């Protein structure tokens, strides 16, 4: 297959805005100043598209995004060079704050996200299929979000137009 014709599409049904605070030492019940702060638009499929972009490999991300913070999420994607088609949903993209301290396991704080439905899954899969040829690779990963049955998810995966990863 000609490399120029390879197309990769990723699907993220449960995106997240990930913020990692790194600390050399963390003191409970005291002020702590992080040594670094890194924020990314994320989710399993988005992470794949971002990694591909860093290696100069084009892909198309398809995602569900909560309206309340979609613009912020999309700006983060743009900064990472990720091309994304999205469906806006009432609510917001979940946020995860990770506290990383030397010698201590990571601690995460996660907010609620928008409500996902099987109708939204069908819309997302229609976007995926519209981006694909029979030679495309489609990466679908991550946890099946609440509101989508495993049966509906399996059926949707079986109906992709391309090579499912």
Image (cartoon, rainbow, N blue to C red):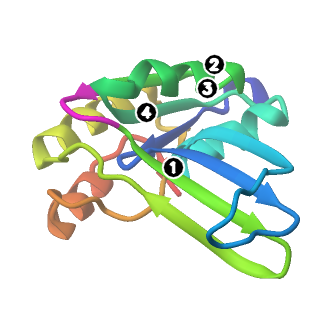
Crowd tier of the residue under label 1, counting other residues whose Cα lies within 10 Å: few below 14, some 14–19, many 20 or above? many
2 or 3: mark nearer the eye: 3
Magenta span: 88-92
Q: Residue at x 40, y 24 (%)?
A: 70
Q: How far is the residue under mark 2 from the one under mark 4?
A: 14 Å
Disc 3 target residue: 76
Please state if 68 lies on the left or on the right of 138 as rendered: left
Residue 105: x and y, percent? 70, 80
- Write the residue at 45% across / 30% down: 132
Q: Cα distance, mark 4 to mark 1?
A: 11 Å
Which secondary structure class fits the magenta region best?
A: loop
Asked whether the viewer can see residue 138, the reply is no
Q: Where 27 falls versus 142 (above or below)?
A: below
Task: Name the N-terminal-most of marks 4 and 1.
Answer: 1
Q: Nearer the viewer, mark 4 or mark 3?
A: 3
Q: Quadrant for residue 148, please give it.
A: bottom left
Q: Which residue is mark 4?
A: 62
Residue bearing the label numbered 2: 78
């Amino acid at each position: 297959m000609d490399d120029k014709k390879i197309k990769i599409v990723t699907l993220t049904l449960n995106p997240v805005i990930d913020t990692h605070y790194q600390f050399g030492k963390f003191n409970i019940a005291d002020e702590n100043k992080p040594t670094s702060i890194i924020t990314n638009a994320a989710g399993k499929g988005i992470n794949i598209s971002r990694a591909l972009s860093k290696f100069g490999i084009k892909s198309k991300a398809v995602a569900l995004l909560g309206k309340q913070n979609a613009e912020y999420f999309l700006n983060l994607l743009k900064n990472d060079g990720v091309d994304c088609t999205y469906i806006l949903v009432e609510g917001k993209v979940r946020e995860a704050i990770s506290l990383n301290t030397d010698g201590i396991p990571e601690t995460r704080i996660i907010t609620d996200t928008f409500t996902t439905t099987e109708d939204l899954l069908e819309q997302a899969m229609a976007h995926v299929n519209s981006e694909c040829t029979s030679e495309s690779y489609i990466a679908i990963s991550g946890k099946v979000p609440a509101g989508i049955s495993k049966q509906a998810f399996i059926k949707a995966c079986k109906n992709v137009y391309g090579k499912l990863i």
